[in-house]
Image: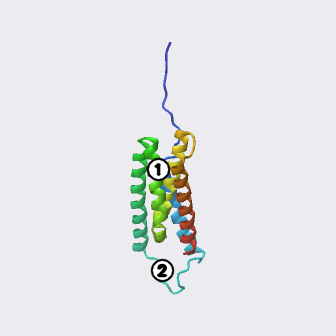
């Protein structure tokens, strides 16, 4: 009897990298939409955004992405308890960084918190109190920060 194995080529949508990238894209779209449709609360005589400011925003979001992806990959390599704890930590971080919504951190951290909570559910079979809290905090921070980026 011969046994053959093949590599699975499925796309892992619960990857922290995809989640961080999604959070960064949502941030970019929200900030752009606020400026294009003139929905931002900035004064009409506010100076235009310069290339240097845009580079600064991109750098800040990339820093958040690196931190969130590193933590997410570290959590996924460990036990379900580590996964749940990291998801909660990122959910709390997303909520805490809402006060600096313009940085994009709540969107990136919130997206990764959501994905880690869903990965925990996939592994264990149900949400626990910790992962449900992480999921709710991450989702609320992500949505609230996106809305504030558009209107802010």
Discs 2/1, front? 1
Is 146 drawn above or below residue 83 in the view shown? below
Image coords of residue 65 (percent x, y): 43, 57
Q: How many marks?
A: 2
Residue appearing at x 48%, y 25% in the figure: 5
Residue appearing at x 56%, y 46% in the figure: 127
Label 2, label 1: how many angstroms apart (C-alpha)? 34 Å
The answer to whether 12 appears left or right of 79 in the picture is right
Residue appearing at x 47%, y 60% in the figure: 92
Q: Name the outermost residue toward the front.
A: 129
Which corner quadrant holds the C terminus? bottom right
Is 123 drawn above or below residue 2 in the view shown? below
| Mark 1: secondary structure | helix
Image coords of residue 135 (percent x, y): 54, 54
Whether residue 13 is visible here, answered yes or no, is: no
Q: Name the outermost residue toward the bottom.
A: 45
Residue count near mark 1 (Cα–Cα under 10 Å), binned few <14, some 14–19, many ≥20: many
Image coords of residue 26 (percent x, y): 54, 62
Return the mark for residue 48. 2
Residue appearing at x 41%, y 60% in the figure: 64
Image coords of residue 41 (percent x, y): 55, 80
Whether residue 29 is visible here, answered yes or no, is: yes
Return the mark for residue 113. none
Q: Are marks 2 and 1 in contact (CB under 8 Å)?
A: no
The answer to whether 58 appears left or right of 44 in the picture is left
| Mark 2: secondary structure | loop
Residue count near mark 2 (Cα–Cα under 10 Å), binned few <14, some 14–19, many ≥20: few
Return the mark for residue 16. 1
């Amino acid at each position: 009897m011969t046994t053959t194995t093949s590599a699975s080529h499925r796309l892992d949508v619960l990857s922290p990298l995809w989640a961080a990238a999604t959070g960064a894209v949502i941030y970019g779209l929200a900030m752009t939409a606020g400026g294009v449709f003139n929905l931002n609360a900035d004064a009409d005589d506010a100076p235009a955004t310069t290339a240097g400011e845009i580079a600064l925003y991109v750098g800040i979001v990339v820093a958040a992405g690196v931190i969130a992806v590193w933590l997410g990959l570290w959590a996924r390599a460990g036990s379900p308890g580590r996964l749940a704890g990291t998801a909660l930590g990122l959910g709390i971080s997303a909520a805490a960084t809402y006060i600096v919504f313009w940085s994009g951190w709540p969107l990136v951290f919130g997206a990764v918190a959501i994905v880690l909570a869903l990965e925990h559910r996939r592994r264990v079979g149900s949400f626990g109190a910790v992962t449900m809290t992480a999921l709710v905090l991450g989702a609320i921070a992500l949505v609230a920060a996106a809305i504030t980026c558009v209107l802010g």
